[in-house]
Image (tube, helix red, strand yellow):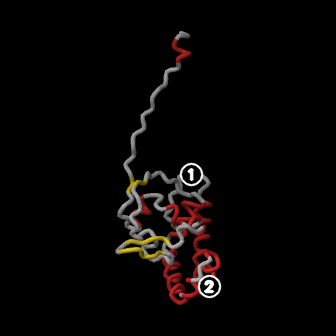
Amino acid sequence: MRTGITLTQPGLLWRAHLSVALAGAMNFGFRLLVPAMPVIMSVLLRDLRYVRQYRSYVTKFSVHFDALREGPVRHYLSDVFLQVKQVPDTIEGECVQCGNCCLNKRCAFLEPVGEDKFQCGIYQSFLRSMSNCGSFPLHAHDIARYQCPSYFVAPAKPVLWLQVDNPDKRGAT
């Protein structure tokens, strides 16, 4: 089975397999929870709009979980939670609220705030800190996957090592 994970350190193979297995189990569980998600989110976030707009949010969560099956759960588990990949890229830029990184605008919590501008509906919530959202973008693959218009991989900067003279050893010769 190919996972697309580059293993550069010994001992990471078990983490790679674990992340694939956990992602599959979580995605399956998410699909089973779709009918209950508006109620669960209303309780967790203390916000009744999820129950009041039940049908709308069942549809949104169904689309949301379909988008998660395309790789974000595996990415979170392998790169963030289990730290399978090293993250060598230096990312620069800032968010322009395009919504692309929010599962290509399929996140159930994404809210429009203007023309082609979006914001996270759970940004201040404890749930966001446990999600993949807080780690975007980790590397160039993230930027390319969501066609992010504002983040980019910065070119590597050369490191200059300078030798420091030790004043105690200068006079000792």
Q: Would residue 168 be visible to someone looking at this image?
A: yes
Q: Which residue is mark 1?
A: 9
Q: Position of residue 47 (x, y in %)?
A: 59, 79
- What's the mark number on residue 68? none
Alpha carbon separation for disc pair 1 and 2: 41 Å
**Residue closer to the observer: 122 or 153:** 122
Question: Identity of the amino acid at label 1?
Answer: Gln
**Residue closer to the observer: 63 or 24:** 63
Q: Which residue is mark 2?
A: 36
Q: Would residue 32 be visible to someone looking at this image?
A: no
Quadrant position of residue 41: bottom right
Q: How many other residues sit within 10 Å of disc 2, few (<14), some (14-19) or many (≥20)?
A: some
Q: Position of residue 154 (x, y in %)?
A: 38, 51
**Residue closer to the observer: 155 or 57:** 57
Residue drawn at (58%, 62%) of the image: 16
Question: On the rendered image, what quadrant is the N terminus found in?
Answer: bottom right
Dot 1: element = loop
Dot 2: element = helix
Q: Is residue 151 above or below residue 125?
A: above
Question: Identity of the amino acid at label 2?
Answer: Ala
Q: Is residue 103 above or below residue 9?
A: below
Q: Is residue 30 above or below residue 88?
A: below
**Residue closer to the observer: 133 or 23:** 133
The earlier-in-sequence mark between 1 and 2 is 1
Quadrant position of residue 114: bottom left
Residue drawn at (54%, 70%) of the image: 73
